[in-house]
């Protein structure tokens, strides 16, 4: 590479969106240990009193809670990456299964569609030339509103408009 050759540049706007998970792996282990211990102790009391089926149902509770958390963590592997440069807007969605979905268009044709319902719910889409892709479904309404504002500003800047 020569000194005069331009280096590969990051797009002017790049956002990586991931779902929030408030309980980390250590917290999950602690929760499951405590819940399992309480269920086991309670089940043993019922077992000693002669109500042995209760022990099995409490074990089933522990199993169902474990499965629910594992499914929740699997859904947390989803992500969306939005890149806006002077030549392209690229939205890449990675599903929890690992499948990738890409939406690409010129920033000159891209439009941000933000809709707020009367009850406060919001939706956010990017549309271009008849194609439309919803994004940020796992964000809360305030975060989605902020993202819509940031996308509008980034698209304006990518089109060569004033930077605010």
Image (cartoon, rainbow, N blue to C red):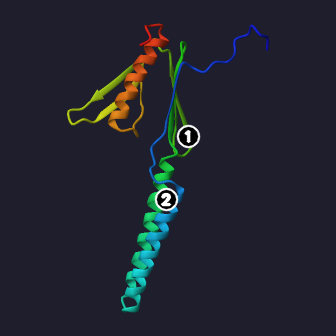
Name the side, left or right, on which 76 lies relative to 115: right
Secondary structure of the residue carrying tag 2 is helix
Q: Residue at x 46, y 72 (%)?
A: 36
Question: Measured along the vertical axis of the image, is residue 122 above or below residue 25?
Answer: above
Placement of the C terminus among the 4 image quadrants? top left
Q: Which residue is mark 2?
A: 27
Residue 129 seen in this snapshot = no
Q: Residue at x 50, y 54 (%)?
A: 24
Name the side, left or right, on which 123 lies relative to 60: left
Secondary structure of the residue carrying tag 1 is loop
The residue lying furthest to the right in this view is 2
Circles 1 and 2 in contact, beta carbons < 8 Å? no
- Write down the quadrant of residue 131 in the picture: top left
| Dot 1 alpha-carbon crowd within 10 angstroms: few under 14, some 14 to 19, many 20 or more | few
The residue lying furthest to the left in this view is 118
Measuring from the top left, give residue 58's x and y in whole percent: 40, 76
Q: Residue at x 37, y 34 (%)?
A: 143
Work out whether residue 139 or residue 57 is closer to the camera in this orientation and state it: 139
Q: Nearer the viewer, mark 1 or mark 2?
A: 2
Please report whichever mark, 1 or 2, sits nearer to the chain's N-terminal start: 2
Q: Residue at x 43, y 81 (%)?
A: 41
Looking at the image, how many numbered discs can be counted on the residues? 2
Question: Measured along the vertical axis of the image, is residue 106 above or below residue 22?
Answer: above
Measuring from the top left, give residue 8's x and y in whole percent: 67, 18
Question: Measured along the vertical axis of the image, is residue 7 above or below residue 114?
Answer: above
Measuring from the top left, give residue 146's x and y in whole percent: 37, 28
Q: Which residue is mark 1?
A: 99
Work out whether residue 153 or residue 99 is closer to the camera in this orientation and state it: 153
Mark 1 and mark 2: span between their CA atoms? Answer: 29 Å
| Dot 2 alpha-carbon crowd within 10 angstroms: few under 14, some 14 to 19, many 20 or more | few
């Amino acid at each position: 590479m020569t000194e005069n050759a331009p280096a590969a540049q990051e797009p002017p706007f790049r956002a990586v969106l991931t779902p929030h998970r408030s309980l980390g792996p250590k917290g999950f282990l602690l929760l499951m240990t405590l819940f399992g211990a309480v269920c086991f102790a309670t089940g043993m009391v019922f077992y000693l009193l002669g109500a042995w089926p209760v022990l099995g149902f409490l074990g089933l509770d522990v199993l169902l809670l474990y499965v629910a958390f594992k499914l929740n963590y699997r859904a947390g592997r989803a992500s969306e990456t939005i890149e806006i440069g002077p030549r392209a807007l690229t939205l890449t969605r990675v599903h929890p299964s690992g499948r990738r979905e890409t939406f690409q268009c010129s920033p000159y044709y891209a439009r941000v569609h933000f809709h707020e319902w009367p009850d406060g719910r919001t939706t956010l889409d990017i549309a271009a030339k008849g194609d439309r892709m919803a994004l940020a479904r796992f964000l809360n309404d305030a975060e989605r509103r902020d993202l819509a504002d940031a996308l509008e500003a980034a698209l304006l800047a990518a089109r060569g408009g004033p930077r605010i």
